Amino acid sequence: MKTTWIYLLSILFLVSCGATRTAKVNELTNKEEKQGWTLLFNGKDFTGWRQYNGNSVPENWIIEDGTMKVFTAPNAR
């Protein structure tokens, strides 16, 4: 009986480990759009972004794995 419980708990643990959730796409829901929300970053490119008091994005800004990164040290990439 004890080994049956250990076996069942092991299976339950393994199944729960495999049930991972994928990240949601960075989009507004219909409700958010109706409420007037604005999506600041699409996770793909720098659309709508620029350097402070500038007209473009500096070269040390990159997008990697859906996140915006800024390198402050020379040759830090």
Image (tube, grey):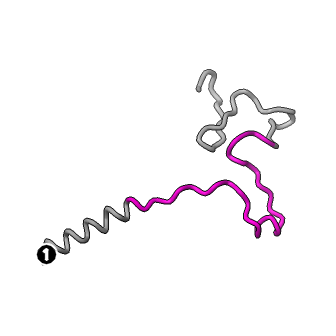
**Vertical side of 1 occupied by 40: above or below:** above
* Residue in view at x 80 percent, y 62 percent: 37
Q: Nearer the viewer, residue 71 or 27?
A: 27
* Residue in view at x 73 percent, y 60 percent: 28
Q: Is residue 29 magenta?
A: yes
Q: Nearer the viewer, residue 65 or 69?
A: 65
Q: Is residue 62 magenta?
A: no
Which secondary structure class fits the magenta region best?
Answer: loop
Q: What amino acid does circle 1 point to?
A: Lys
Q: Is residue 3 left or right of residue 23?
A: left
**Vertical side of 47 occupied by 6: above or below:** below
Q: How many marks?
A: 1
> Which percent across, then down, holds residue 15?
35, 64
Q: Quadrant of residue 44?
A: top right
Q: Is residue 23 left or right of residue 13?
A: right
Q: Nearer the viewer, residue 32 or 50?
A: 32
> Which percent across, then down, holds residue 18?
39, 59
The magenta region covers 18-47
The quarter in which the C terminus is drawn is: top right
Which residue has dot 1 on it?
Answer: 2
Query: Badge 1: how crowded within 10 Å, few (<14), some, or many (20+)?
Result: few
Q: Is residue 23 left or right of residue 36?
A: left
Helix, strand or loop at mark 1? helix
* Residue in view at x 24 percent, y 71 percent: 8
